[in-house]
Image (cartoon, rainbow, N blue to C red):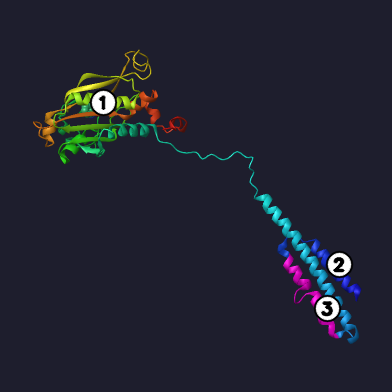
Amino acid sequence: MQEKFDALKESAKRELESISSSKFLGELKAKYVGKNGEVTALLRGMKDVPADKRAEFGKMVNDLKVEVSTLFDEKEKQLKDKEMQEKFDSEAVDISLAGKVNKNGSLHPLNIVKNKILDAFCGMGFEVFEGPEIDTDYYCFQALNIPKDHPARDMQDTFYISDNVLLRPHTSPGQVRTMERKQPPIKILSPGRVYRADDDASHSPMFHQIEGLVVDKGVSLCDLKGLLDEFVKIMFDGDTKTRFRPSYFPFTEPSVEVDVTCCKCHGKGCSLCKGTGWIEILGAGVVNKKVLEMSGIDSEVYSGLAFGLGIERITMIKYGISDIRTLFENNVKFLKQFNRR
Ligand code: PHE
């Protein structure tokens, strides 16, 4: 009998040794000490044991059951410990590794400059009004006193969709649309895309402008000068000077072009300013009375001033960019340089 018990214990030991995962432990335990297990079967054989040997036999079987169960408990603890250690090892974080840095996007240089321009003027009480990019001949030309034979209407400059509908070649129609809607006092900025059939290092068929319009009683060229002087100081550095040159636009009278002292050589003369010390940044003027009248504003009571600037041009001057096309190529290496406000 004892030999049988020993053999059973040995067999349980051997089988336990071959197990490497706690997953299979339950099944094996049932085979030995479960309800239909081999040790339990021994107890069932009790009835065949002579009455005087039964007590001894029962004790032996119970001892065996305790011994085998202990073997299982020990193995279970051993396997659980091993598995826990493996889990810890596999989930370990190597704190000596360099952290991963998220690559943040940044604003496009044109948006940085646009926001800066809008901020500068909004600080002076301007509101923003955006007009449509596809507009009519009336708003782009006629209402701005641009006669039928004016060179700006040339098919070579303007993208026509039909005889009367076109991609706006400037943001000046924003002036007309504002004046039609609202009586003075008016103080608006109209930013947006504009289109012209032009394509070289300093011209792009699509570019961005910001139009400014002020209409009120007693507005003069003097106000325009003060306003743009202040703007230039905010936009470039505080020492930058402005210069007004006489010019011509059909919708302003008188008209001017505004130059600033070159931000690279500060007026001494260099390649950026072509030796002159000055760089042109915008067109402006006192709003032509005819334009006020056409949009329903009494030119005897009110006067206005308007200016239009190119965002690309200001961006190129500010950052020393020599080819406008780099602004539209979306080369990340180029754009990354502006990753600061
Ligand atoms: N619309 C003009 C241009 O595109 C700029 C301008 C705007 C000039 C307002 C005077 C007044 O060149």
Viewed as shown, does residue 332 lie left or right of 3?
left
Q: In the image, what residue type sits under mark 2?
A: Glu
Q: Is residue 4 magenta?
A: no
Whether pointer 3 and pointer 1 mark residues with C-beta atoms closer than 8 Å, the reply is: no
Task: Tell me if mark 2 has few (under 14), some (14-19) or many (20+) residues whose alpha carbon lies within 10 angstroms of its own.
Answer: few
Q: Main secondary structure of the magenta part?
A: helix
Q: Is residue 32 magenta?
A: yes
Whether pointer 2 and pointer 3 mark residues with C-beta atoms closer than 8 Å, the reply is: no
Foreground pick, 203 / 113: 113
Q: Is residue 9 above or below residue 324?
A: below
Q: Position of residue 211 (x, y in %)?
A: 25, 32
Which residue is label 2 attached to?
A: 10
Q: To which quarter of the image does residue 331 belong?
A: top left
Mark 1 sits near ligand 1, with its Cβ under 8 Å away: no
Which residue is label 1 attached to?
A: 228
Q: In the image, what residue type sits under mark 3?
A: Leu
Disc on res. 42: 3
- Residue 201 appears in view: no
Q: CA distance from mark 3 to mark 1?
A: 106 Å
* Residue at image coords 72%, 68%: 26
Viewed as shown, does residue 224 lie left or right of 52?
left
